[in-house]
Image (tube, rainbow, N blue to C red):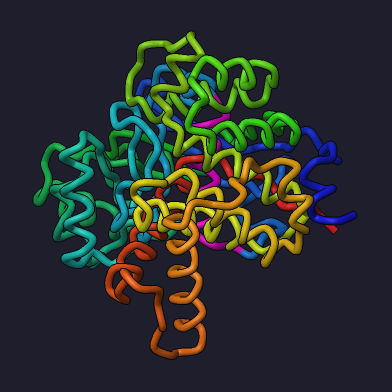
Amino acid sequence: MSPGAGMLGALSEIATTVCVARQRIEDGSGRAIGFEVLFRPHENAQSAAEGWSFDDDVATARVLTAVAAEFDMHDVSGDGLVFVNLPRSFLVRPDLIPLDADSVVLELVERVTIDDEALAGMDRLLDEGFVFAFDDVVPGDPRLTHVDRCAFVKVDVQQVRADRVFALVEQVRAVAPGVLLVAERVETPEQMALARSAGFDLFQGYLINRPTTLVRESLRPQTRIAVKLVAQLFDPTTNMVDLAELVLSDAALTRAVMRQVSSASKTRHEVTDIVQSLDLLGRSRLRALLMLELMHSTGYQDPEVPLLALARTRAVESLAPDEPLVAATEALARLCTTVLGMSEAEVADWLPRAAPAPPQATVACDALDRYLEAVDRAAAPVLPAGFTSLQVSMAWLHGLRDARDLLDTVPQPRQPEG
């Protein structure tokens, strides 16, 4: 099947399984104050690493996406807090976190080095209302210097010798008297007794409960509907009512849009009007969601293709300010023919490409193409008149940044197997 036929054909799989595990955290009276949300590669996995080449960044991204876009927060934590592990890459890029601050505790894993860049990320997130926990704190832990920035400190009672637990608690209290201490990996009554006598406030571990896996089937949008929406998003005459009618014709798209708005709008007020939802979401984010789906549904395996598609369209929009949508359409069409191997006729079936494209749009795409080709050859670019290397390079860098930001806000379709 050609890439074009794949893009216009029905999806072989209309649902994917999304799963995370959660483990209860309770106080001394047995009251649940929240749950730690844990990555699971599949619904039968008993641990994060089972059948998975573990990567902190990917695991965190999948947990955040699941919590933000697939599960209702109440399903995950009830009225309590959600504890989520946070590796360094998310700490230094706080804009990648799609959750509301008022119900989330960001757990900095022990592999995070607290340097000036990390501290700046912490301070920015603290200003936004997030709270932190240091995970797996041990005696002599270099993070203890900065524990005053935390609301919680978690200690693995199996990792710290019993005769050192009391001294560690005193050390934490001396720096941050108001911090809540969490004893984790509590698996025996003896460990619970030790944690209580040492002065821990909260408890987590198999003695309390084992992690339970939450599973949800996530519908994927119908490709034909997504294709029509992409076409209309590139049409400047399309209004939000027209877009809303198409979105409402696909249950998966409707749910995805509503969940994205719930995450993006940073509000607890329920949004029930799809036109209002699309206004809040914006054309750029909707375009990102749809283009991800289309690129993946072609069967093309390179994960960079959605990034390149969005980056190219964003770059040429800035290079052709008088014809941004036309230039973006031309850039996407060129990518489909050169990277996905589609014919001009296949592209014309779904993408409303101007024929011929206005000169400003065409020359902007030419400038970007020549610049990127020169970069690949480590050569100086020869650009069309009116464009400079600095101008095009800045447009490309801003396009990449915007593309990454957009892709980080939408759920990633699962790659086809086999």
Q: In the image, is residue 94 above or below residue 235?
A: below
Quadrant of residue 179 within the rendered picture: top left
Can you tell which quarter of the image residue 20 is in?
top right
Q: Is the magenta stretch mostly helix, strand or loop?
A: helix
Q: Total of numbered circles in the picture? A: 0
Closest to the observer, 340 or 268: 340
* Residue 344 visible in rendering: yes
- Above-or-below relation of 391 to 352: below
Q: Residue 122, how many percent across, how many down?
A: 21, 51
Whole-percent x and y of residue 127?
Answer: 15, 39
Q: Give the range drawn in magenta.
A: 54-71
Q: Quadrant of residue 302?
A: bottom right
Who is closer to the viewer here, 327 or 313? Answer: 327
Q: In which quarter of the image is the C terminus?
A: bottom right
Residue at (13, 48) in percent of width and height: 148
282 to 341, vertically: above or below: above
Q: Residue at x 30, y 49 (%)?
A: 94
